[in-house]
Image (spheres, helix red, strand yellow):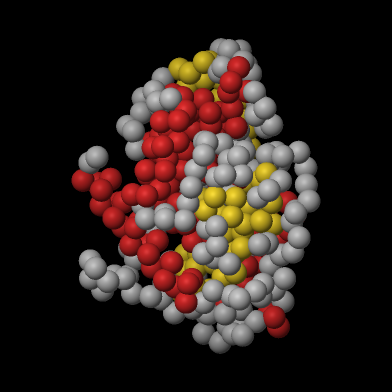
Amino acid sequence: MSNTVSIRSRTAWIFCALLLSAASAFTNTGPVFGITPQGVPNGTEVPGEAVHTPAPAVRVASAERVETPPARSAARSAGIRVRARAALVIDIQKGEVIYQKNATSPFPIASITKLMTAVTYMRMNPDLEKQVSITRQDVYRANWTKLRYREQVSAMDLLYATLIASDNAAARALARASGLTSKAFVRRMNETAASLGLSNSRFTEPTGLDAGNVSTAVDCVALLWTALQDELLAEILLVREYRFGTNRRTHTIRTTNRLVRDTVSERQWVGVGSKTGYIRRAGYCLVMRALGDSGDDIYAVILGGPTSRTRFTDMGRLLDWSMRDGGRPGGVDG
């Protein structure tokens, strides 16, 4: 492993430790705002450009000691009602936990798993021009995929399909393109998680279709932050729409994040990286980074939303509130 990767791993570990200590200090004994999952076919995601700004360095007093940031608590009077099982909103620049609900409790994370699949793959210095043939195993019970058996797809396009369209066959093919067996790749995913300090994350396969892929809101933020440190992954995670060709056809894929796909002029923020997820046992999930007009750098997570609509509604409200009131002096405090 290169020195650069080692430094990034160390930084991510510090970042994760900071979040853990902050969120643990303010863990709710019960839901603060308010839930319950219903759904569409298991693992189905309803099928996004901006400029990436690297996350700032975490405030650290020394190599051994991580400063715990202050936390703000949202008030019921703010009109924030988060219906998900877990949620977390933090301001990276200020080192503040703006909102949290069950942020350190492990839950299935569905296709957010694909962030770890991509991070693990990219750390293997892959040949992105490599052509990969889609197998029967790739498409078997994939639930959501545009790829078909025997299509030839470049590793680069598999990355885009995995992260933008949350294509399950693409994620399986990408893991296989690493040259490792399925079990060996999953083992590498867990080793990567451990190296990043994601102690509450476990992975069983690369798509997120298995509810055994579990993590916490805290770990999901650290995972997205890590992915955005990779220049290519950062670029991919910002794309709204992407077109690529195979030996059989041309595919057009669109981001599964409605908040990125549907621009709203009155928003005070712009999404600059995200990943959605859904399976029945996980509910609707979303991890997202947003930059505010006033320079706010917010990471937010929704895990276990009851519907796709409430997932995006909750996230939009949290980001709107964080940028408008929560992130400024005199904001609502419960």
Q: Is residue 281 above or below residue 17?
A: above
Count every numbered label the image shows and give the total. 0
Q: Please indicate, yes or no, whether residue 66 appears anywhere in the rendered image.
A: yes
Quadrant location of the N terminus in the rendered image: top left
Left or right, 105 with reference to 197:
right
Can residue 292 be seen? no
Above or below, 274 against 29 in this view is: above
The quadrant holding residue 234 is top left
Describe residue 80's horizontal placement relative to residue 197 as left or right: right
Q: Position of residue 271 (x, y in %)?
A: 55, 55
- Compare residues 96 and 204 and report the one nearer the observer: 204
Tell me residue 174's x, y (percent): 48, 28
Foreground residue among 111 and 190: 190
Residue 144 in picture, x, y percent from top left:
67, 32
Residue beneath the point at 60% across and 32% down: 168
Name the residue located 58 percent from the left edge and 21 percent from the top edge.
137
Residue 204 position in % (x across, y down): 52, 39
- The residue sitting at 55% across, 57% down in the picture is 106
Check the picture and name the quadrant holding the C terminus: bottom right
On screen, residue 10 versus residue 262, left or right, reads: left
